[in-house]
Amino acid sequence: MRHTFLLLIFSLQLLVAYAQRIDLPAKSLHAKTAYTIGYSEIEIDYSSPAVKGRALWGVVVPYNEVWRAGANQATTISFSTDVEIERSVLKAGKYSFFVIPRESGKWTAVFNRDTSLWGAYEYDKTKDALRVEVSPRFSDKNNEERLNYEIASQNLENGYILLAWGKLRLYVRIKVDAMDKAVEEIKTALSNSTDENRWMIEGSAADFLLWVGQPGPAYPYIERSINQQANSWNYWIKAKIHAALGDKEQALNAAERAISAAKASDKDNYYTRHQGEIDWMIEQWKKK
């Protein structure tokens, strides 16, 4: 009997050891997503479980308990700069990300300093860096079979993290401080510029300010750029600034100057490279 029992134990040990060596595809796929908003580089590292026909909320994922917001190791989110999450400041760094679902009302998104966790089994609330309340949304039509994260920007300083799984769409708003740093970068570049390249920096500053929706502040920069070295590039930026300010007549005038500048110099090929876009925009201005 004793010999048979020892043989059985040995066989089970061999079976366990063999099972541990089997290299099978993971049920929950490892995934990463990264994006830059302003100057802040954001990266999410997670495992992506599938719905597989299961009831998720209150069943697979219990209500009122800390959930790893993924599978396997805890989901981690890193920020290269300080950010605001739902209007609360979070310092630059790497955090484990958890969610506390609720049957009704807002859910809680948690950023925890311990990034070595497997799931939420050893989660320690005292290591939380930030907790914020977020409103879950549920899609009537689209079903996300595998849990998926997305990072998106809405403008220079604002964006969001989206967690989608099943019918759930959970948005976590992000705000970064980019404009002040960008203005300082412009000032520094201009103070270090030479007479030969100052027109490019002035033009680039105007183009940037126009892009972030500030055509008024952009105008002095483009005027200085043109006064230093006129070409189709900076005249076209001037045209777009006028259009953004609502002056289509001046926009068309600057556009014609951009075309004339390109025709006057074999080295000025900006208009040639962008002719389709420029001609289309000119036609749109003429219609209004």
Image: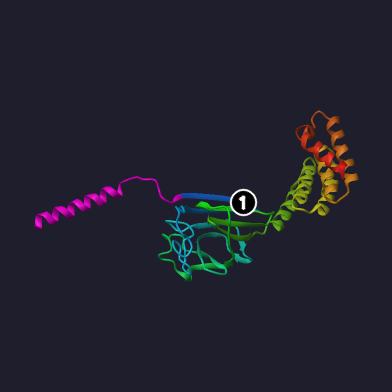
Left or right of 165, for residue 288 = right
Near-viewer residue (256 or 7): 7
Position of residue 26 measured from the top left corner of the image (x, y, whole percent): 40, 48
Confirm whether the magenta stretch covers residue 27.
yes
Magenta stretch, main secondary structure class: helix
**Residue type of the residue flagged with mark 1:** Thr
Left or right of 244, for residue 126 = left
Q: Residue furthest top?
A: 266
Instruction: Write the residue at 26% across / 52% down.
Output: 16
Position of residue 176 measured from the top left corner of the image (x, y, whole percent): 65, 59
Coloring basis for residues:
rainbow
Near-viewer residue (244 or 84): 244
Near mark 1 (Cα within 10 A), the count class, few <14, some 14-19 or many ≥20, is some
Which quadrant of the rendered structure holds the C terminus?
top right
Instruction: Write the residue at 86% across / 39% down.
Output: 255
Q: Magenta part of the protein: which range?
A: 1-29
Position of residue 279 measured from the top left corner of the image (x, y, whole percent): 81, 36
Q: Would residue 77 be visible to someone looking at this image?
A: yes
Q: Would residue 229 be visible to someone looking at this image?
A: no
Left or right of 104, for residue 199 = right
Q: Read off the residue under disc 1.
A: 36
Which quadrant of the rendered structure holds the N terminus?
bottom left
